[in-house]
Amino acid sequence: GLAATGAEAQTAYPTRPITVVVPFAAGGPTDTVARLIAESMSKTLGQQVLVENVGGAGGTRGAGQVAKAAPDGYTLLIHHIGQATAATLYRKLPYNVLTDFETAGLITPVPMTIIGKSNLEPKTVGDLITYIKANKEKVTYGNAGVGSASHLCGMLFMSKVGAQMTTVPYQGTAPAMNDLIGGQIDLMCDQTTNTTGQIKGGKVKAYAVTTSGRVKSLGDLPTLQESGMKDFEVTIWHGMYAPKGTPKDIMDKLNAALNTALEDPKVIARFADLGTEPETKDRRSQAFHKQFLADEVAKWKPIIQAAGVYAD
Ligand code: MLT
């Protein structure tokens, strides 16, 4: 009741539904990961874990909302690599990626795929590069805004190709995928959690995966490295966050429930269908996530600075 002491109130957590903010549109790759995890965590925690999609500004709008939420364990964030790249991409980010969040743990590393509309002419990565060099800005590239995974991949891909395409930003790659299937845009680089079904269903043309090794569930697709793009390696890691100052016992409960979700056979099977797997056990602690986030901010900073891409 209202008279409960702090200690009692903490032990009881959670006593009401928890909201997990996904900083991209519903039905996309981050949403897919978050809903799988939320469903399992709901069972473990005995309270509903609800997903709320807060898209916009390449994921920084949703992340900023969580940074400023009450640190009580009832507002969380599931975000990907964009949590780290935004620190450099945005000159005026209204929150600090490293100091405004508690890290609950890493979730899953997801490969990306270079995909085109089904009737796009080029057949191979080599053909595609020739086509982009010849058509440049006439080629349209959909992404989820500056700070998104699809933005990062596109930035690296265009720098390797040596030609700029016209970027078309969306609130997430779910709406971008609709336009790719509809033929309104030409190309995307998007996570296998969003593209596997469309590739297998023949709705889009797949060129390559962005990881250094092939993806088991998409075994026919070459890697960009095999296709001649040396050093190309992008894997999209995901993590769960709470606002800074969320009590330690709540963070420990969240990390434990997240770990339980990552052992859930249903989650593991769905991840495998989608070309991914849970993070390995040695990478699932709060401390590992905190250090990894800092390392990723440092890793991407010079790459982004060299590319010279910024948002305000
Ligand atoms: C999404 O959920 O829409 C994606 O993660 C977007 C992206 O970062 O490319």
Image (cartoon, rainbow, N blue to C red):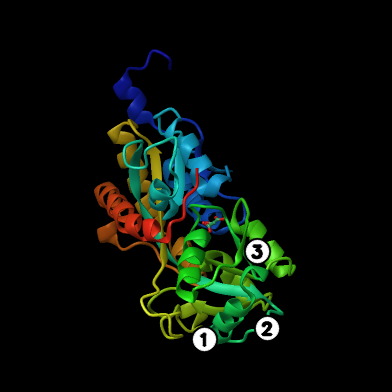
Q: Secondary structure at mark 2?
A: loop
Label 3 is placed on what type of residue? Met
Q: Residue 107 at x, y = what percent? A: 39, 56
Q: Are marks 3 and 1 in contact (CB under 8 Å)?
A: no
Q: Residues within 10 Å of mark 3 (few under 14, many from 20)?
A: many
* Residue at 36 percent of width and 24 percent of height: 9
Q: Taking 190 as reference, is 235 left or right?
A: left
Q: Taking 200 as reference, is 61 left or right?
A: left
Label 2 is placed on what type of residue? Glu
Mark 3 to mark 1: distance in Å?
Answer: 21 Å
N-terminal-most mark, 3 or 1: 3
* Above or below, 13 relative to 234: above
Label 1 is placed on what type of residue? Asp
Label disc, if present, on residue 220 of the rendered structure: 1
Which tag is nearer the camera, tag 2 or tag 1?
Answer: 2
Q: Residue 106 at x, y = what percent? A: 35, 54
Camera-nearest residue between 74 and 187: 187
Report whether the residue tagged 1 is closer than 8 Å to ligand 1. Answer: no
- Residue that numbered label 2 is attached to: 121
